[in-house]
Amino acid sequence: MKQITKERKEVLLEILKNRFKQNLKRHPDITWEDVLKKLISKDALLWSIDQMELTGGEPDILSINSTMFVVDFSKESPSGRRSLCYDQKALDARKQFKPENSAMNMASQMGIKMLTDEMYVILQSLGDFDTKTSSWLLTPEAIRDLGGALFGDKRYKQTWFYHNGADSYYKDRGFRGYIEL
């Protein structure tokens, strides 16, 4: 099981508390005490949230229909999670210039899930994210079976969804993740 040290746990909880208090519109009906109750004794969960933080995700709480989620709120796609193709199948299919990993593999290794297109729309309603980057999104199997994958960004004050070959990767495309609390 993945563990977080006591010292790092204290630092992470302070980062999360400060970010929570600076961004109350993301979670108007939730108090920090509500969040802390869900996090305090769950070291494996905190380890995953720490991975989000360490890879540049700037995780914060998002409330959707009274459910709490920890979501990447970095202005651009997390810097430590870019230049990735979509999944292992796409990674295996590349014959040349393979990226180091895939978005789905990295999310799994971190213990998080990739944002869905629905969650991405909610994220974008709270600010301007991915205005210079893009983020892979969880792709329906019907699209993935045909070799494609979805990604999103925000340009011209609009949220956009696109498709690309799942084996493609770009220096400015990463992925955003979440954890349900």
Image (cartoon, rainbow, N blue to C red):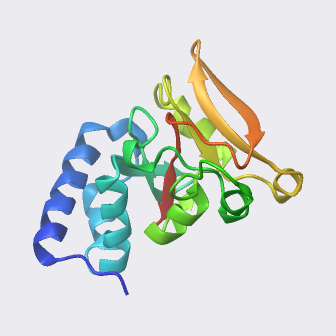
Note whether 77 is above or below 91 in the view shown. above
Q: Quadrant of residue 113?
A: bottom right
Q: Residue furthest top?
A: 156
The residue depicted at 74 percent of the width and 52 percent of the height is 139
Q: Nearer the viewer, residue 131 or 39?
A: 131
Query: Where's residue 35, x and y in %?
Result: 32, 62
Nearer the observer, 172 or 29: 172
Name the image quarter holding residue 70. bottom left
Query: Residue at point 39% right, 52% down?
Result: 61
What's the residue at 34%, 81% (across, down)?
Answer: 2
Q: Is residue 158 above or below residue 127?
A: above
Residue 128, position as x, y percentages in the image:
47, 25
Q: Is there any visible trace of residue 67 in the rendered image?
A: no
Name which quarter of the figure residue 19 lies in.
Answer: top left
149, 72: nearer the viewer: 149
Q: Image quadrant for the N terminus?
A: bottom left
The C terminus sits in image quarter = bottom left
Apparent side of residue 95 relative to residue 129 in the rendered image (left or right): right
> Does 65 appear above or below 109?
above
Residue at figure coordinates x 50%, y 33% from the top left: 172
Task: Give percent across and percent down for residue 93.
Answer: 74, 58
